[in-house]
Image (tube, rainbow, N blue to C red):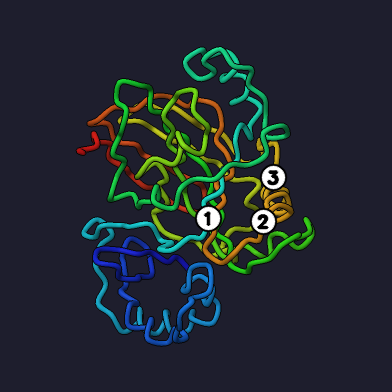
C-alpha cells in the first residue's frame, strides 16, 4: 500500500499515477483522550486501518498525482533520527572537502552514533525547502527513510525489521558550519519526507535499493543502500538501545557520496527504488 497526505490534510492511497481519497476512513481511528499517547496515531493503527482505507479509496473519485500538493506522509512523528556519515564514500568526500569538514576531523557513524532533527523541520515535497543562512553552504542529502510502526526499546537485530511500518524518501538538508549537527539539520523545512509511504510488505530488502538525486538536470548522488555502514536493522537496534521508538518515528538512514549545495530557484529530483520519485523546490526563507 502507498499512503500519502495531500492538500488540506487529506489521506490518500496511490494507485498508479492517481490519488484516491481515503480520508473518510479516519473516522475509524480509535478515540483519543488527553494525555494522548506518544507517536503518530494513524501510523500506530495502520495495520488495523488498512481495510477501511482501501474501502474508502475504492469509493472515491481519483485525481492525478500532479494535481495535488503532497505533504509529509507522517503528520506527527515523535522523533526524526539521523545517521551521520553512514557511507564510506561520503566519509571520504567529507574528509577531502574543506567546506564540509571546516578543518575538523571527520569520522563515521561508528564514532558519532545518531543525532536528532527537530520535528518542526519536517515538510513534504510540495512544501519545498526554504533556505536559511544563504550566505553559507546548504547541502542536499538524499536518503532512504524508515517509519517505525511498532514501537519498542532494546529491539534485537533479529526483530528489528518487524518494527518498520513503511519506507519513504528522505532529504536530510544541512547548513554547513561549526554548530552541532542537530542544530544545523533541524532548521525548518530541512527534513523532507515523501512522496508517500510504501508499506514494508512492498519492500523485500531495504538494504539493496538504488537511490539518487538530481539538482535541476545534474546528477549529484547515485548509490545503493547496500553501501551503508550500519544497515537498516542495525540502525533500529542501535537507536532503540538508547531510546524508546514510537509509531511514526522517522529514521533517516544516511546519505552517500555526492552531497552538494543548492540555492534558491533549484529543484531537487530524488528517487529511491521501490518507493518512487519526488521533486522538491528550493526557495529562500522569508522572515
Q: How many marks?
A: 3
Label 1 vs 2, first from the N-terminus = 1
Q: Is residue 272 above or below residue 33?
A: above
- In the image: residue 279, left or right of residue 152: left
Q: Which residue matches tag 3?
A: 231
- Mark 1: few/some/many CA within 10 Å (<14, 14-19, 20+): some
Marks 1 and 2, how far apart in space? 10 Å
- Between label 3 and label 2, give the one nearer the viewer: 2
Is residue 277 left or right of 263 when viewed as pictured?
A: right
* Residue marked by disc 2: 243
Query: Would you say the residues marked 3 and 2 are in contact, meaning their CB atoms lie under 8 Å apart?
Result: no
Return the disc, 3 or 2, that comes first in the chain's sequence. 3
- Element under disc 3: loop
Frontmost of labels 1 and 3 is 1
Q: Is residue 79 above or below residue 14?
A: above
* Residue plotted at (30% across, 74% down): 21
Question: Which secondary structure lies at badge 1?
Answer: loop
Give the residue number, with chain letter if any, for mark 1. Answer: 79
Specify few, some or many for label 2: CA neighbours under 10 Å numbering under 14, 14-19, or 20 or more: few
Q: Earlier in the sequence, mark 1 or mark 3?
A: 1
- Please give the name of the residue rendered at 67% of the width and 29% of the height, measured from the top-left corner: 108
What's the mark number on residue 24?
Answer: none
Query: On the picture, is 35 further left or further right than 110?
Result: left
Mark 1 vs 2: CB contact within 8 A: yes
Residue 33, placed above or below residue 75: below
- Which x, y percent locates residue 71? 33, 57
- Residue in the image at 50% along x and 20% along y: 100
Report the Cα–Cα distance between label 3 and label 2. Answer: 18 Å
The CA distance from mark 1 to mark 3 is 19 Å
Where's residue 222, x and y in %? 51, 32
| Quarter the C terminus occupies | top left
Amino acid at each position: 500500500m502507498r499512503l500519502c497526505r495531500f492538500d488540506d490534510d487529506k489521506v490518500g492511497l496511490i494507485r498508479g499515477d492517481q490519488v484516491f481519497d481515503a480520508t473518510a476512513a479516519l473516522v475509524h481511528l480509535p478515540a483519543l483522550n488527553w494525555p494522548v499517547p506518544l507517536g503518530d496515531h494513524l501510523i500506530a493503527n495502520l495495520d488495523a486501518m488498512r481495510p477501511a482505507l482501501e474501502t474508502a479509496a475504492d469509493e472515491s473519485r481519483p485525481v492525478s498525482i500532479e494535481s495535488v500538493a503532497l505533504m509529509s506522509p507522517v503528520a506527527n512523528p515523535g522523533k526524526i533520527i539521523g545517521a551521520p556519515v553512514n557511507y564510506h564514500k561520503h566519509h571520504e568526500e567529507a574528509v577531502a572537502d574543506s567546506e564540509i569538514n571546516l578543518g575538523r576531523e571527520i569520522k563515521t557513524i561508528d564514532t558519532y552514533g545518531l543525532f536528532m532533527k527537530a520535528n518542526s523541520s519536517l515538510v513534504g515535497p510540495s512544501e519545498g525547502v526554504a533556505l536559511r543562512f544563504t550566505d553559507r553552504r546548504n547541502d542536499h542529502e538524499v536518503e532512504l527513510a524508515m517509519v517505525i510502526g511498532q514501537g519498542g526499546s532494546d529491539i534485537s537485530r533479529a526483530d528489528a525489521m518487524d518494527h518498520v511500518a513503511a519506507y519513504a524518501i528522505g532529504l536530510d538538508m544541512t547548513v554547513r558550519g561549526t554548530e552541532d549537527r542537530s542544530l544545523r539539520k533541524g532548521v525548518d523545512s530541512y527534513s523532507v519526507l515523501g512522496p508517500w509511504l510504501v508499506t514494508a510488505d512492498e519492500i523485500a530488502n531495504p538494504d539493496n535499493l538504488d537511490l539518487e538525486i538530481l539538482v535541476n538536470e545534474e546528477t549529484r548522488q547515485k548509490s545503493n543502500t547496500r553501501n551503508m555502514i550500519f544497515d537498516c536493522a542495525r540502525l533500529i537496534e542501535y537507536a532503540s538501545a538508547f531510546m524508546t521508538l514510537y509509531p511514526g518515528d522517522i529514521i533517516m538512514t544516511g546519505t552517500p557520496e555526492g552531497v552538494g549545495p543548492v540555492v534558491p530557484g533549484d529543484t531537487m529530483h530524488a528517487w529511491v527504488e521501490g518507493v518512487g520519485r519526488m521533486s522538491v523546490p528550493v526557495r529562500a526563507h522569508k522572515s
